[in-house]
Image: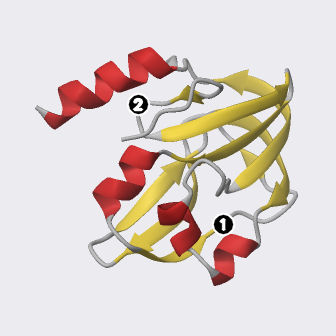
């Protein structure tokens, strides 16, 4: 399982890369994609959609199941990664480059886990 130092993480296995205080990219962690298995479909939000911290804003379908992806910030979707619509396997191949959406005008944030805290959280979850 790969965890990058320049990101923060959630207990629902999303990663967040802040570009500044009110703009962030959101994606699924390496652990999440490994657990889900080969992804075959992704449903992304629309540009202009409002997101709410802790609520589902996308979903992914693997050969095993359909899973919600939760937004860790409240804001507005300013851009989506359209490449994922045609190639959801990029989430499996390069999870930390395969961002789902850019969220701007962020007004609220979830409590994030540091890379070290996330690694510990996953270890406990695997027990």
Residue density around tag 2, few if under 14, some if 14–19, many if 20 or more, within 10 Å: some
Residue density around tag 1, few if under 14, some if 14–19, many if 20 or more, within 10 Å: some
Q: Quadrant of the N terminus?
A: top left
Q: Residue at x 58, y 68 (%)?
A: 90
Compared across the picture, whether 36 is left or right of 95 comes to left
* 20 versus 116 height, above or below: below
Q: Residue at x 41, y 57 (%)?
A: 33
Q: Residue at x 39, y 50 (%)?
A: 32
Q: Secondary structure at mark 1?
A: loop
**Along the viewing direction, whichever of 113 and 116 lies nearer the viewer:** 116
Residue topped by disc 1? 44
Give the mark nearer the N terminus: 2 vs 1.
2
In terms of image quadrants, where is residue 79?
Answer: bottom right
Q: Quadrant of the C terminus?
A: top left
Picture coordinates of residue 26, whole percent (x, y): 66, 44
Q: Residue at x 66, y 78 (%)?
A: 85
Residue topped by disc 2? 11
Compared across the picture, whether 67 is left or right of 52 comes to left
**Rendered image: mark on residue 30:** none
* 109 versus 28 height, above or below: above
Picture coordinates of residue 43, whole percent (x, y): 60, 71
In terms of image quadrants, where is residue 116?
Answer: top left
Give the CA separation, mark 2 to mark 1: 20 Å
**Along the viewing direction, whichever of 4 and 29 lies nearer the viewer:** 4
Picture coordinates of residue 28, whole percent (x, y): 52, 49
In terms of image quadrants, where is residue 64?
Answer: bottom left
Picture coordinates of residue 45, whole percent (x, y): 70, 63
Q: Secondary structure at mark 2?
A: loop
């Amino acid at each position: 399982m790969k965890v990058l130092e320049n990101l923060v993480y959630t207990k629902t296995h999303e990663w967040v890369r802040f570009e500044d205080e009110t703009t962030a990219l959101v994606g699924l962690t390496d652990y999440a994609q490994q657990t889900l298995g080969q992804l075959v479909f992704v449903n992304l939000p629309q540009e202009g959609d409002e997101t709410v911290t802790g609520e589902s804003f996308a979903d992914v379908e693997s050969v095993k199941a359909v899973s919600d992806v939760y937004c860790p910030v409240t804001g507005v979707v300013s851009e989506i990664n359209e490449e994922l619509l045609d190639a959801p396997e990029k989430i499996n191949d390069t999870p930390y480059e395969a961002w789902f959406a850019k969220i701007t005008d962020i007004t609220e944030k979830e409590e994030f886990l540091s890379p070290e805290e996330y690694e510990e959280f996953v270890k406990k979850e695997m027990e």
